[in-house]
Image (cartoon, rainbow, N blue to C red):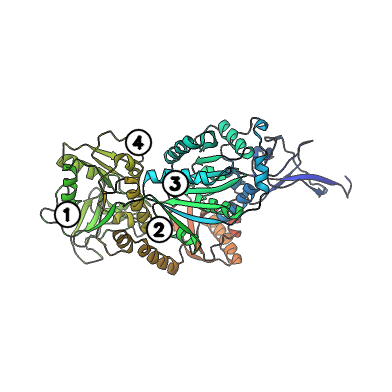
Amino acid sequence: MKKDSVVAVVPVVFDLPLDRAFDYLPPAGADLRPGMRVRAPFGRQWLAGWVAGVCRTVPAAEGRTYRRISRVYDSEPVLTDELLDLARFISLRWCCSLGQALAALSKGLARCARNHEREASPAVAETVAASPGAFEYVCLLIRSPQAAQDAYRQIAEEAGTGSGLFLFPELNSACACADTLKEAFGDRVILFHGGLPAGERIWLWKRMMKVGGALVVGTRLAAFCPLADLRVVVVAGASSAGHAEQQIPRYRTFEVARWRCQRRGIRLVVADAALSLEERLAAGAGCRTVVAGEGGRASFHIVPLGKRRGKTDHPMGFLSDEVLSLFERTLLEGKTVAVLHNRKGACTLPVCGSCGQRFSCPNCGYALVSGEKGTQSYCRRCGRTVKTETVCPACGSRKVREKSFGLRRMYEAVSSVYPDVRIALKTAERAAVPDGTQVVFGTQAVVAFLPVLKPSLILFPGADTFLSVPDFRAEERFFLLANECVANAGNERCRCVIQTRSPSLAVYRALAASDPEIFYRHEEEVRRQMSYPPFSILVRIDVKGRGEAVLSERKRTIEETLRRAGVTAFYDGPERSARGMLAWKYLLKLADTAPCPALVSLVETAQAQVTADPDVL
């Protein structure tokens, strides 16, 4: 081999936690471009990967050999330049490799695509060549389900001949919007989601790349659709759990949509019954707020919980006398009731009978559950067992009792006291609710059923249980849930009753006064003082090792990387170990709200799991 000889190589990345590309020889005569999928040898196995850059020549080093790509899956790139840049943003923001980000973007696309040249349209290229406009942020406050569908139809009309993207947290909501838009726009409407077969998904993907004017409706996966003439992106229920990916990379639809709209200079519409603090602050002073729906809306009533008159062991003891009277009157009038609670089972919780104080796990802060004998309590989240307290730490009372707060117990109590009332239980595992149901008990899954039920009364018998979880967003999640309930009820005369032992909390005062600014001001002040999102990015690093020596070496690698990056963990400590493995976790606050590139390397150098925006700290 001559000293001055060169070889042509292309960089390829894989769906592996390796933050670098690998050079390969291209097949003879292949025209490889970034965004194309290939098959290449990796160690002793063959993996599918993505071309991450242009073909380049490098000096042929003595003794250095390059392996050759064995197969090219695509005749043209399936990922546009915009989507490649989006993958780089996702890799940096959510601490994953570029290959993992590209895998998320092209998830489920068949590798043998049909020919779509017959569908090509010159209108797309003309639209792309046009200069972008100014990014616009619009907050669309939904007051009823019908008002939402009317607003989506109007947004699609304003997109003109360009494309629009409508993103929903649940498939049922996406299907309802698609049906509405198809009535007005016919074949322009495309329903795109993860449940489609791989062959149909790649067929629709190619169609979107080559044909302009598409109105794409789907779940979070549709946020990556390759629409060249995109004019508007609508994110419905942006704070919903359905918009947060649970696998690596743990991206959020709202941030992906905002990145695409800011890059293109187009309109971003966030549609919800109420905005999260992050969405409200992201809007800034230039945000335009539009209310979808006229007339009044359901009212909130906050009922303080005190000592119940009469027998405390009454089956309906989970409702105060005032709320019980309202519940019975609603049923006598032949109207429907929805009861929401965040505990499913029939378990009992240790509670102070004087002040209502609940007992939390000293390890993770989650609510403790009473054991069978009542002398011990255990945590269902981390598994820790502790001795049941006999004295309340809040008020000093010795009236510590076991009380049941589960949906199952409530359901059984109402069934026994009102045997003639048609009652149903609705959770994520129970899909169907019988026709003619008068009372529906359920978790948050019941919210999607409210437009059908059209309740006259919505009850939160234990609103404080939504707040007593180790999550700094707990009050915000309840604020959004309550507003979503009254919006989905579709009944202006509906009353939403919230029982609480802490009626002075900002979230309850804001709901009672119909003034969200009360909640936003308080929540912004608290998060700013605590340096919680959106004023920082939370990152959790988990590392395991079989034996103290292995774990110590990996911890040393992590701490050295953090020191060089100028990042300090605000907490580090042991985690539960399993199968002989020792575990340790680090919690970080990146105060400048910018991700740290050095964290991605820890996945390889320390075999750590790095999670940005973790659900559980």
Q: Quadrant of residue 365?
A: bottom left
Tell which circle, 4 or 1, labels the residue nearer the N-terminal end. Answer: 1
Seen at 35% across and 36% down, the residue is 431
From the viewer's perspective, is 566 left or right of 395?
Answer: right
Under circle 1, the secondary element is: helix
Viewer-nearest residue: 342 or 60: 342
As shown in the figure, which amino acid type bears the numbered disc 4? Ala
Q: Are marks 1 and 3 in contact (CB under 8 Å)?
A: no
Under circle 2, the secondary element is: loop
Find disc 1 in the rendering and name its residue.
322
Viewer-nearest residue: 555 or 193: 193
The crowd level at tag 3 (other Cα within 10 Å; few <14, some 14-19, many 20+) is: some
Q: Are marks 1 and 2 in contact (CB under 8 Å)?
A: no
Find disc 4 in the rendering and name its residue.
431
Under circle 3, the secondary element is: helix
103 versus 264 height, above or below: above
Q: Position of residue 526 (x, y in %)?
A: 40, 67
Q: Quadrant of residue 601?
A: bottom right
Find disc 3 in the rendering and name its residue.
151
Q: Quadrant of the C terminus?
A: bottom left
As shown in the figure, which amino acid type bears the numbered disc 2? Arg
Q: CA distance from mark 1 to mark 3?
A: 39 Å
Q: CA distance from mark 1 to mark 2?
A: 30 Å
Q: CA distance from mark 3 to mark 2?
A: 29 Å
The crowd level at tag 4 (other Cα within 10 Å; few <14, some 14-19, many 20+) is: few
Between tags 3 and 2, which lies in front? Answer: 3
Residue 473 is tagged as 2
